[in-house]
Amino acid sequence: MRSWLGRPLLWLLCVPLLAGGAVACGGGDQGDEAGPFRIGVMESVTGPGETYGTVAVQAKQMAVDEINASGGINGRPLELVVEDEKCNAQDAITAYHKLTDVDGVRIILGTSCSGAMLGAAPLAEEDGVVLFSGLATNPDIANAGDFIFRTAISDTQVGVDTGNVMWSDGIRRLATITETTDYAEGVRRTSVAQFELLGGEVVGAERYASDTTDFRTQLTKLVEAGPDALHVAAQSEFAGGTIVKQVREVGYGGPIYGEVVAAGTTALEIAGDAATGMKVVTADIDPQNARGAEVLSRFLERYGYITLPWYVGSAYDDVYIAAECLRRIDDDQDAAGFRDCLYEITWSGAIGEGYSFDGNGEVVGLTNIVAEVLPTGERTAENFGYRVLGPAPTN
Amino acid sequence: MPLPDQFTSRGDRQRTMGIMLAALLAAYVFWKVLQSPDQALQFTYNGLSVGAVYALLAMGFTVVYSTVWFFDLSYGVAAAMGAYGVFYLRSQEAVGGQYEVNNPVVNVVLGAVVAGVVAWSLHAWLYGRLRGRFGRPTLLLAGGVLAAGAGLYTVLVLAFPGEIHVLLSPVVCAVTALLAAWALRRLQRALRPRARLAPFVAAAAPVCGVAGLLCALLLAGAEGSRLYLSWVVSCLMAGAVGLALYRGLYIYMRERAHSHLVMLVASLGVLLAATAAITLVFESAPRPLPEAFGSEPWSIGGANIKGFNVFAVGVAAAGFVFLRLLLGATAFGKAARAVSDDEEVAKVVGINTTVVIAAIFFIGAVFAALAGLLSGHDTAVQPRMGLLLLVKGWIASVVGGMGSLYGAVVGGFALGLVEQFGIWDLAGEWRDLVSFVVLIVFLSFWPTGLVPRR
């Protein structure tokens, strides 16, 4: 029975392992001699954060091209040196060394991911290099150092705002379901803390590991506890969308609250009509803000798509803030001067008006908004599937 | 293979403990049900939904295990393939095509696997019988052409999943025509056993041809059928891979290693390699499959269940009936039972044991793939699902009784329900722990399971 096919077949089974490939990322271009101001950019061009990292790089490049088209800064053009931080601390440190040692920049705009930010921040602080992020939201970044700034709103604020929104909507009994990751646990902790401070009661709390796909048992228990509302804190859009879908499957009809992940494009696609009416607390561009609307329409025109509008605006504003500070100090190597400029500056841009930075380098003067998810028929690429109800209430 | 005596009758003390444990558990569940009947009903529906998947897995597992008495870990590969096969073929429709994947390497590899499996199956099944009549070169040529054709056709179908309904319509046409011919032939034999063949062929050929063509035309115009055709293709691919593993791993290892332990480790290696390959092609995050029918929940008696879950329970029941008939009422079933009792003796009395076991592996893989894709549609697919489903299927068959088909069904649904009710007072993350506790309890107190194999 030992046939002519015996061994080759075994070999064939090994071939699937060869599938897959690697994509390298590009670096910056060379500039003119003594010409441009050069600043670094670190975003997650690849890796888990590639959707928002790519958007951030594109928004920044758009801002730079606009500045250069209108004459540059003090007559000199602005140039970005882009490195990939791949959404993790290790690669962020590699990218940081490349930018500071090889390219010699002292001002870096980035990162996209909190983990990457927390990895590179100690080095930047020690070297006296400015690290200025538009996207990283982890609360720990507030205390990362004197040279560390961000226009991203801290997760602490998201939690406080979520607690306030639920309370002012008349929710008194809350059930929570949370992914066991730093980000999601942080959102849950701060939301619940604010909600309980106001007098609310948590009647059920469930946690799940990131690779869970069947949430129905846990959701059945939560629903049976008789909550006024369900709070979903997810790290991945898949889990956020699936939870919303499955909680409707086990017969829950009440309100659902979430944050930016649960209202992401993928999450809404998965949840379908189950997500209709869900309220999310997130940073978003105020529809009344003319500057914001203009930036978004230019982005759409230039790149042919638009997603994560707040990230676009935040990354875009960061470049203009940097340009303003460079205009004042007129030296791209003077990180200390740049830092002092950021402490003093008050800015009005795409993501808000009259915002500034506090002693921790945290942005003040920006608020999260409350949005309501639209029925599937009304969701479009322009409205991202939800309707902004207004700024989050303060209690 | 009877279990050693010490397991079945080791002292009354253990049995008493087991019975007390069961009584305690029953009292606890009864108390909880009285406390909140609504939640109990919802848990029951949830449990039946996952139980159907576990039952299918346990049935496939049992069929393979009770034939070769080998603990096949690579069985999990088939479950993951069933689910990921559907995702692969329909990725342009899942989540708005965001994660579309179609890799030429994967297509060619699977095409090669199919070609190899077809060639080997023809060789093992027909070569010995036909050698005398046609001679070796003719048979090799015909087999080679058939195998290469099947492989190329597979690559074509995999490369253009958007046109799967058009690409598959010729096959459906042929299958329909053959089925019609078979049915007519049965009818003719029953009505007029002595009639001559030629007039029958003349009368039946146009009927069968028209029926086949009609089916093919209907299918080629029905875009809604793509998802369900993907199910079929996915199950067949999983079956082909199951056969390839049988030939490439099982036979190969058995010729070399005379220990089941070596084969166990080898099949574990295959499972891990397949998981890694799936992660490479599809990334590690869970992904949803496109919506099948019945995703709207129905409210029955105050609790909710999806139409799709009811369908899954139906598939499990149909699978059970199919296996019961196949193993109990056909010549193939007799052969399979003979192999199960003693492979050497079966070979001596003239059963082609290789083909029988190959068919069993194929059926087992198809059941696993069905379970995988039902679970994938119900929740989502993720690379580790092969291992998770394998473990659940195995626990279900231990609970039901290793090697017993009734036990597999009972065990599958029982495990599904126990998992739900077990975490009534625990946090939900403990669900998998509950299944393992059940496994340990059963291995300790009822190693023969709820419905022992006779």
Image (tube, rainbow, N blue to C red):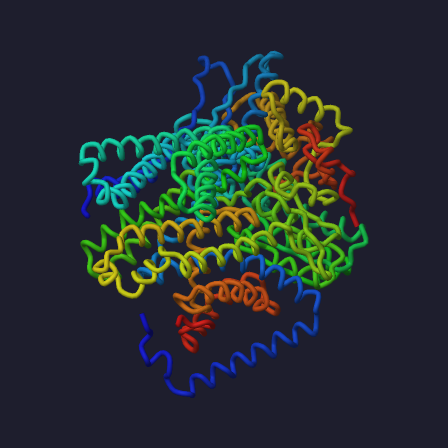
Q: Quadrant of residue B5?
A: bottom left
Q: Residue furthest bottom?
A: B12
Quadrant in which the C terminus of chain B is drawn: bottom left
Q: Nearer the viewer, residue A111 or B359?
A: B359
Compared to B416, does B137 lie above or below?
A: above
Q: Nearer the viewer, residue B399 or A394?
A: B399
- Residue A105 pos. (x, y %): 47, 27
Which residue does the image show at 55% across and 22% down from the upper left?
A61
Q: Is residue B102 visible?
A: no
Q: Quadrant of residue B351?
A: bottom left
Q: Is residue B196 left or right of residue A45?
A: left
Quadrant in which the N terminus of chain B is drawn: bottom left
Q: Is residue B156 left or right of residue A52?
A: left
Q: Is residue A382 visible?
A: yes
Compared to A280, does A216 lie above or below?
A: below
Which residue does the image show at 48% across and 36% down from the upper left?
B89
- Residue B223 pos. (x, y %): 57, 31
- Residue B180 pos. (x, y %): 48, 39
Q: Is residue B10 left or right of residue B87?
A: left
Q: Nearer the viewer, residue B445 or B205?
A: B205
Which residue does the image show at 43% across and 49% down from the upper left?
B366
Which residue does the image show at 27% across and 42% down from the upper left?
B120
- Residue B404 pos. (x, y %): 42, 66
Q: Quadrant of residue B11?
A: bottom left
Say how many tags the image has.
0
Compared to B345, does B222 lie above or below?
A: above
Q: Nearer the viewer, residue B131 or A291?
A: B131
